[in-house]
Image (tube, helix red, strand yellow):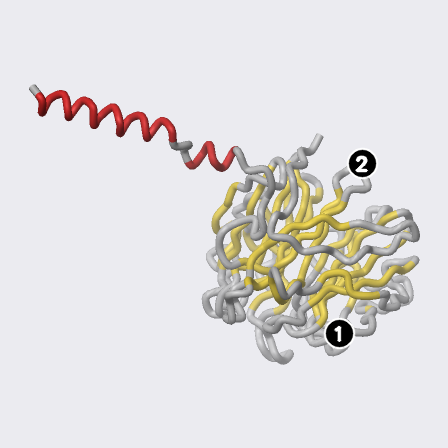
Amino acid sequence: MKKSISQKLLLKIILGAALAVPSVTALAQDKKTSGNPVVEGWYADPEAKIFDHQYWLYPTYSAKYNEQVFMDAFSSPDLVHWTKHSHVVDTSGVKWVRRALWAPAVTEKDGKYYLFFGANDIQNNSEKGGIGVAVSDKPEGPFKDHLGKPLIDQIINKAQPIDQFVFKDDNGQYYMIYGGWGQCNIVKLKNDFTGVIPFEDGITYKKITPEGYVEGPVMFKRNGKYYFMWSEGGWTGPDYRVAYAIGNTPFGPFKRIGTILKQDATIATGAGHHSVINVPGTDEWYIVYHRRPLTETDANHRVMCIDKMYFDADGNIKPVKITNEGVTSRMLK
């Protein structure tokens, strides 16, 4: 009898303890901020978009080049709770890619979703690779090769064909801004994204490299001005950072104004290669970027983070404060 009572008592204690401890799901729902990093895993070069009333992040899978052959994506209704979509694109969908698939740029057009990417890390014009494009019916993919070959496969104006950013101007024209090795080009995309076309002056690849430019271009428009942002320093080191300029056209001229994102020795190093989110119908802005935890020395140990971005009364971007907390919930209407 005593043994039976003890077993019942033990069962009550175990059940009571289980009921008192919140489930993993409940803990996730109780999150007050995104936290930085916003997701688990090594990720870099995030592209941030808004599709179908959801926030989307498309990062590079941060690994050695030969292992970097796929991309995951993440979606969220509020910037705090994120859902992972594994292998939205990989080498099974783009056969000519053999390694170094990185730095996606994603845009929606006519009900289709296009993912532009750099691949194979070409070092000269005889190697196969460069900037490609894949297409899907859904933002979560799967994305399949749009052309069967690279969109841009040549080193032009000394710009390695990587780190592409797709910018849609108010008149509906799509441009692609790209380039590594300290050089940046802008090109005009064909309406179906199957190639590039010359500008009115007959030039196809316009060089718009500002002082200090290394890689990772981003462009957006605010109050009639074109904001051009880029990464400086070395991506493997602590001095990686983001600077910007403001112009009256997508072609500049762009004069460097200053640094707005960089390391904080108390939080993380190597903060750079970013994108931005503007909440539709508002002047609320977020910057999404990668950085390296203080405990890490491996170049590929980078994580994806989000913080708020603000402007001053003159329209200049204020220096961003990188945080461990990240951002609070922001639902889309």
Can residue 196 be seen at all in this image of the molecule? no
Quadrant where the image shows the C terminus:
top right
Three-letter code, disc 2: Gly
Question: Which residue is at a point 80% across and 36% down the rendered structure image?
Answer: 281
Percent across and percent down for residue 323 are 64, 53
Q: Is residue 333 above or below residue 274?
A: above
Can residue 316 be seen at all in this image of the molecule? yes
Percent across and percent down for residue 245 are 85, 63
Side of 83 relative to 45 (left or right): left
Along the viewing direction, whichever of 94 and 264 lies nearer the viewer: 264
The crowding category of the residue bearing disc 1, from other C-alpha atoms within 10 Å (few below 14, some 14 to 19, many at least 20), is many
Secondary structure at badge 1 equals loop
Front label number (1 vs 2):
2
Q: Is residue 97 above or below residue 325?
A: below
Residue at the extreme front: 2
Percent across and percent down for residue 206 are 83, 69
Residue 281, which numbered label?
2
